[in-house]
Structure formats: C-alpha cells, structure tokens
Amino acid sequence: MPPDSAAAAPLSARPLRRITVLSGGVGGARFLQGLLHGLANGSVPGGTPETEVTVIANTADDWWIHGLKVCPDLDTVMYTLGDGIDHDRGWGRRDETWSAKTELEAYGVEPTWFGLGDRDIATHLVRTQMLEAGYPLSAVTEALCRRWQPGVRLLPMSDDRVETHIAVADPESPSGRRVVHFQEYWVRMHAAVPAEAVLVVGQEEATPAPGVLEAIAEADLVLLPPSNPVVSVGTILGVPGVRDAVRATAAPVVGLSPIVGGDHVRGMAAQVLASIGVEVSASAVGAHFGARSAGGVLDGWLVDERDADQVAPLERAGLRARAVPLMMTDLDATAAMAAAAVALAGSVTA
Ligand code: GDP
Ligand code: CA
C-alpha cells in the first residue's frame, strides 16, 4: 500500500478517533445516546468503542434560582448518558420527588413555576458550592461527571455567564415589549406567544471554556446534532472564537435537522426561528448554518425522508445533503442517524 493511501481513503473507511458534538439538551442528549450506542456496536462506519466523543454543551439556558446555579443542558446530557434521566419528561432525575418545591411554595417563594426536584437539587448544591469556592464551571462539570460517567468528555461552551433572554409583546409596557429569561419563556409561558427577538446576554464578552477550541480543531468529525438551531447550537457558535474554529477545522462538519416536515419535533425551534426571520424548514435551517464553502459552518446536512424534496436546493447552496429517517424513536434508529451523518462526512472528504 502506498504510504498516503490512508489519507486518501474516504472517512468512513478510516478510524474515527475523535468526534466533537455541539449539543443542546434533550435533542442533543438523545442523539449522543444513539451515537455512543452505534460506536459500541460497530454500526457507525469507522467508529469503535474507543472513539472519543467530546460534547460542547450550550450553557445559555443556565440561570440562578433559589440561590442555586442550574445548567439544564449540561445536566440533561449528563443524566441521559449517565442513566439518571427521567425518560418520560426527558429532563431531570428519575424517581424524583418534589418536597423542596412544595415547601418553597408554602413559604410563598417565587417563582413557583420552575420545578426543582429533590434529587436534582443535590446536583445544583454541589455545583453552586464549587462555583462559590472559585472553581470554573468546566471544572465543576468534570467533577459532577465523575459520578455520572457519561462516556463522553462534557465541556460547557464557556465558563462565563451567558444567558438567553427572549423579547415578547407586552401592551402594558411603554416600549410595547418585555424581555424575559429563556426559562420564563419556555417553562412559564410554554413558548405560547411569539418570540420577537432573542438576546444572548454576555455572549460577546464570553470566552470558550478550556478545551473547546482544541476539541473542534483536533476532531476527525464535528457534528451538529438535531438541537435547537438558535438557542442551543446558535448560542454555542456565538461564543467568540467558536464559529471561526468550526469554519477552520480540517474535520468535516455535518449537521442533522431538528426540523422535520416543516416543524420542530418537540420544543420551540419554530418560535425562535421565526424571531430571527428563518423559515421553519429543514432546508432553511441548513442554509442558515450555511456551507463552509460559502462562509457558513457546514459541509453536510441531513434532512428527514419527508423533506427529501429539499436535498436538491441544499446541494445547490453548496451543501452535501441526504434524506434519511431522522426520528429518534429508539437507540437503533438514532444510531442509524449517527451512521448516516458519518457516511455523509465520508462523502465530503472522499
Ligand atoms: P433542548 O435544549 O432540551 O431544547 O434540546 P436541544 O436543543 O438539544 O434539542 C431540541 C431540538 O431537538 C428541537 O428543535 C427538536 O425539534 C429536536 N428534536 C427532538 N427530537 C427529535 C427527533 O426525534 N428528530 C429530530 N430530527 N429532531 C428532534
Ligand atoms: Ca436547552
């Protein structure tokens, strides 16, 4: 074999040593579960159980409540991959009880609409104490993961405080609108009123957490899972330096659409896409991220079979696109999505 034959082989035939995934909460965590399943059973081309997966998680949903620092997306990934998640809710701890919440309500302490379960509170107590002792969020996350052993290296996008706020119409306010924390929009308001704007407070001053830029630069493959394109992946890419690192990495960058058949599968992607003027379709989200060859962050974009008619326009926009089943109904279906993403990456580099 000539010495350079490995370099010329398509990615799918090469061993995948390192995969880096830019993840939100529930959508990202479910995808990661399928990816790890596929790496473990050999169904992801080039992947092995030794393939290292680094997750760069969104922290712009984080907030302080009842004196506790809560990081919903980090915890959803950690609990899901560490087998502590409540499967029905998709977030929080399994076998949860709610005594602390009930007691706080009895004291009349606001807000009462955000549920912190008793088991979950232990995580936030550990995190808050470590933060107050001076540890950065990345070190705290590493410490929490020592218990959960998620099977990935889990990094917050930044150690700095970054918070998504949503502007909504409010006829009683002199400006005609009011700005609420992302959690209030999602948990209290159920994203039932239109989002007029998405404001990511602190983003411009933030720096990537230790290891984030290296994980992107040194990866063999960068994946954008089916996470919210605005308030999960969008906020990660918005940390100064991250978008440039994704644009510059030698690894192929492939994403999976969270929009299927013209709507999100769950959550509120439709509301926030509308607020930034992006049509709620798989192809519009692919075009919003854009082809790296045209100033964007993607080489390839997977859409669901139902959106197969959008493959041709995506390819005209410079992206490798393919239509495959994109519903994460079980581990095997999700592993097949990960395998399709790796195969698409192989076609980019072939
Ligand atoms: P969050 O932080 O908990 O909102 O989770 P993410 O940002 O990681 O993911 C939310 C996105 O996942 C939503 O936009 C959903 O449309 C998407 N999603 C959830 N389940 C599925 C699925 O089975 N297939 C696809 N393609 N997308 C999904
Ligand atoms: Ca989230």
Image: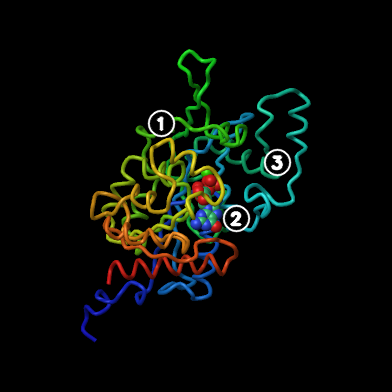
Q: Which residue is mark 1?
A: 202
Secondary structure under badge 1? loop
Report the residue marked by disc 2. Answer: 80
| Residue nearer the viewer, 90 or 48 | 90
**Vertical comparison of 17 with 152: above or below:** below
Ligand 1 neighbours mark 2 (CB distance < 8 Å)? no
Query: Residue at 46% of width from left, 72% of height from top?
Result: 44
Mark 3 closeness class: few <14, some 14–19, many ≥20 residues within 10 Å: some
Which numbered disc flags the more N-terminal residue, 1 or 3?
3
**Residue 173 as seen in the image, left or right of residue 316:** right
Return the x and y of residue 156 as percentages of the image width and height.
Answer: 46, 46
- Residue at figure coordinates x 29%, y 50% from the top left: 296
Q: Amino acid at mark 1?
A: Gly
Judging by the rendered image, the residue that carries numbered circle 3 is: 117
- Where, quadrant-wise, is the N terminus in this rendering? bottom left
Secondary structure state at the residue bearing disc 2 = helix
Sooner in the amino-acid sequence: mark 3 or mark 2: 2
Of callouts 2 and 1, the N-terminal one: 2
Task: Please determine whether, in this image, residue 164 is positioned above or below residue 253.
Answer: above
Q: Is residue 142 visible?
A: no
Residue 12 x/y as whole percent: 36, 74
Tell me the distance, in whole angstroms, between the alpha carbons under discs 3 and 2.
16 Å
Tag 2: amino acid: Thr
Q: Nearer the viewer, residue 118 or 183?
A: 183
Q: CA distance from mark 2 to mark 1?
A: 28 Å
